[in-house]
Amino acid sequence: MTIKTWYFETSALNEFAKGKTVEDAIATRAFQQVRGRKWITSPVTFWEILLMGDDLKKEKLIFFAQHLLDRELLPSPEEIITEYIDRGFPLKEKPRPLISKSQIAATWRDLVDVPQKTFIYDKGELKSRVALLKPFSKMIHQIMKGNDVPLMPSDLKSGIHATLEETLNALKFVKEKEYDAEQRKLFKIAIFYMMLILCAEVGFENHFLRAFWNKIGINNTKLRISYALEHFEPLIYQGPLAAMATMAYCQSKLNFSRGVFFDNLHSFYITYVDVFFTKDEHFKNLRSYLGSHQNANKIIHFDEVEFTSYKRDSNVIKGPIIS
């Protein structure tokens, strides 16, 4: 049997859990397994959940997810980016096992196997990581307005004074072909994310990045940026960071939500799953923007799915299922 993967983005998991019990989750997971479906998520979802201010709601959602979702997580964004580079920037992704080797993924397996456990983490550390992203929203809006902006936010103190416009114009593929203003905006957002995530380690699973750069032999952010711009140009127009830039571009046409960075990270996974399940309206906008692209058909909004329920003979347990 071919297993179909359904990716639960954070908003979809939140919405699905409303009004349902752990018994519902158990019954639903069993039913989906019979139908050849694997309901799965990624470290991004749990970073968002762990940042929730309501501790009781957070623990209830984690407990529900322990009984609903697969015990394996998809790779973190950092794993996906570095693997994409190591595999030579493939134009098409071939089917392959996608299992995160991150610490949060190992913890999640343990939590699914022993549901009495929960996450133990430093919430202050998570919040400090998010605080580093505050300059992001303003810079994206400036890019969308057509304004030139610094290559890196001043908050990161990288010592780099070049602008995104100057950086883009210096790239080989840009010198070889003319691009319209909208496409250039997408490239600039992708460059910005490449600097932010890959080079400056403004993320949550940075040990993968350190191992990646240690192998190359570069640990200075400024030198990393120079190296990435010279050797990793394909990241700007294809692959995971380009997908992330497209999501940011779509969101910037509307009001940015508080979770814009996480939404952009979630967009990584559309390429790697059969169904991308969401409650977030921003992904509807992304779907419209993608048009006839194969990834557009993978995005399913919560309101577009009909839910039914059934009664299991043993203990008369109700379980909501997707039909």
Image: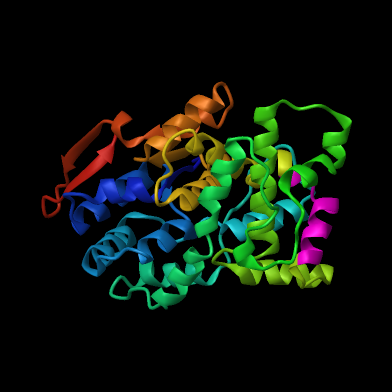
In this rendering, would 226 be left or right of 315? right
Q: Is 158 rendered above or below residue 149?
A: below
Which residue corresponds to the image point at 58% horizontal and 54% vertical from the top-left? 98
Frontmost residue, 66 versus 140: 140
Report if residue 133 lies within the magenta region: no
In this rendering, would 167 be left or right of 118? right
In this rendering, would 238 be left or right of 142? right
Report if residue 228 lies within the magenta region: yes
Picture quadrant of residue 182: top right
Which residue corresponds to the image point at 65% horizontal and 37% vertical from the top-left? 186
Q: Residue 44 placed where, x, y %?
A: 47, 57
Q: Is residue 323 visible?
A: no
Most prominent secondary structure in the magenta stretch?
helix
Q: Residue 270 placed where, x, y %?
A: 53, 41
Magenta part of the protein: which range? Answer: 222-235
Frontmost residue, 96 versus 239: 239
Q: How many marks?
A: 0
In this rendering, would 309 be left or right of 305? left
Q: Residue furthest left?
A: 316
Q: Residue furthest top?
A: 292
